[in-house]
Image (cartoon, rainbow, N blue to C red):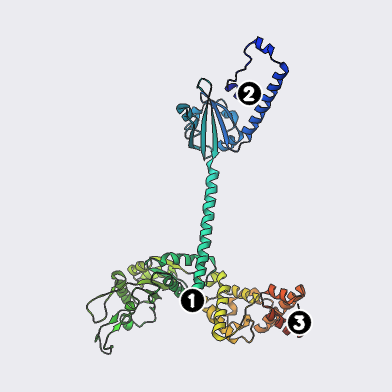
Amino acid sequence: MMDILDAYNMESDLSDEKKLSDVDKGSLIHELTKVRELAVNLDQIIEKSLDGIFITDGKANIIRINRSYEMISGLKREKLIGTNVRELEGKIISESCTLIALRTKQPVTIEQSIFLTNKKVLVSCNPIFNKNGKIILVVSNVRDMTKIEQLQRQIFQKDELVSKYKTELDLIKQQVSAGSDMIAEDKKMLEILFVAQRVAHVDSTVFLQGETGVGKEEIAKYIHTISDRAKYNFIRINCGAIPDNLFESELFGYAKGAFTGANTDGKIGLFEIADKGTIFLDEISELPVDMQVKLLRVLQDREITRIGAVEPIKVNVRIVAATNKSPDAMAAMVETGAFREDLFYRINVIPINIPPLRERRADIVPLLEHYVRVYNKQYGFEKETTLKLCKHLQAYEWPGNVRELKNVTEHAVIMSLSNVLDLSDFPLKNNRFPAEIFADAEASNLKKTMENIEREYILKAYKQHGSIRKAAAMLGMTHSTFANKLKYYTRAEAPAGK
């Protein structure tokens, strides 16, 4: 540390031998000891600083660096001490803050790149002057901006995550408030609803693709419900169910006396009925090619002409199309000419691919419980599910997707003889379950097998907790349901008061 003290040109007040002889030698030794202690402390402060310390003399020769600067720069002090900063500029560092401070004689702060470690640093340089106004030192404080930028990115990512979770919660709230069957808790489905929310407030055509029963119509309704067109009509058209000879009259209507057998007053078409609202063109891939031409013209011109009429009618509709064909299958239809390429590009502005239920299993139990509540209310029942039932239904492959889940749940609620729904109440295909679910079955009768499993869980839970309430809570049952089942399986009264 004495080299830095020398650089400060510290002058002794004892200017001559006579003066020295007048000073108490003991006091002088004491003062020198204090100076040495201060020097040691200053050295420790510099060395322990988390920021890099970089010190040069008045000619830009490096006289001191600390350990933090070694770590930031990737260079050892023995390589740097005595080197002039001019030798580093452009080779080791991008621009020298020290040289700017020497030139301007002012404190300087710049951003600097260190090439060896590929780091960005913030450097603050302060020149130190002697009593004659000459720069004798330049002290630089070097802060690693790379870590700060990493922290900023982490904060930004966390903010994005919070925003995403907030959006997901908002979507779930919208589902509840709308009373829709559009139940989504799986990450994949929430992402689809996020996209749907984004496109709902613009008029771009949306193209929904997914297996039969995945909920394409529900997504289309969701888009309509949260759009600016919500107060107008939502019209569903099954393109595969309308006969070719009726397609044009159904969609576009016909004028008075347009053809024999027609209504004498004419007929308004579905596009006119949907004016200012949304038209959902379901199974559009089933549309005959000659009908595709007519539909394309309507989508391009946004006007229809009734059969037998001359004047076109302007229509303001939002188009949502859908198909159960996979993207590859649709591409093949376009390639072979079975589906017009120009129409495909017209409807495929915002494609949304809805995954099957087996690929979003987090939605299965929420959908199950939703439909149980719906049919309990509709038919006046109080049916309940169990943890075991939910586990098994989550393992099922659901080839019919949400539509199958909805239908079999209605069947189970109506046909079950107990208020506690059992797997045997659901008309499902056994080959769509994993093999391990039936590996321990001791009887061919599924009802009996599931009763044995339930009996084992009921008795084991009660033995473990000794309390009906605690055992019921563990199995996800109500207190009364558990008590009834315990009585049924033990053929004896359950202890009261527990």
In whole angstroms, how far apart are the C-alphas of marks 3 and 1? Answer: 45 Å
Residue sticking out furthest to the bottom: 261
Q: Which residue is mark 2?
A: 2
Amino acid type of the residue that numbered disc 2 sits on in the rendered structure: Met
Q: Which residue is mark 1?
A: 213
Q: Nearer the viewer, mark 1 or mark 2?
A: 2
Label 3 Cα neighbours within 10 Å, binned few <14 / some 14-19 / many ≥20: some
Q: Nearer the viewer, residue 200 or 246?
A: 200
In whole angstroms, how far apart are the C-alphas of marks 1 and 2? Answer: 83 Å
Q: Nearer the viewer, residue 409 or 336?
A: 409
Residue sticking out furthest to the top: 18
* Upstream in sequence: badge 3 or badge 2: 2
The quadrant of the image that shows the C terminus is: bottom right
In whole angstroms, how far apart are the C-alphas of marks 3 and 2? Answer: 89 Å
Which SS class for mark 3? Answer: loop
The quadrant of the image that shows the N terminus is: top right
Q: What residue is at 28 percent from the left and 88 percent from the top? A: 263
Q: Which residue is mark 3?
A: 494
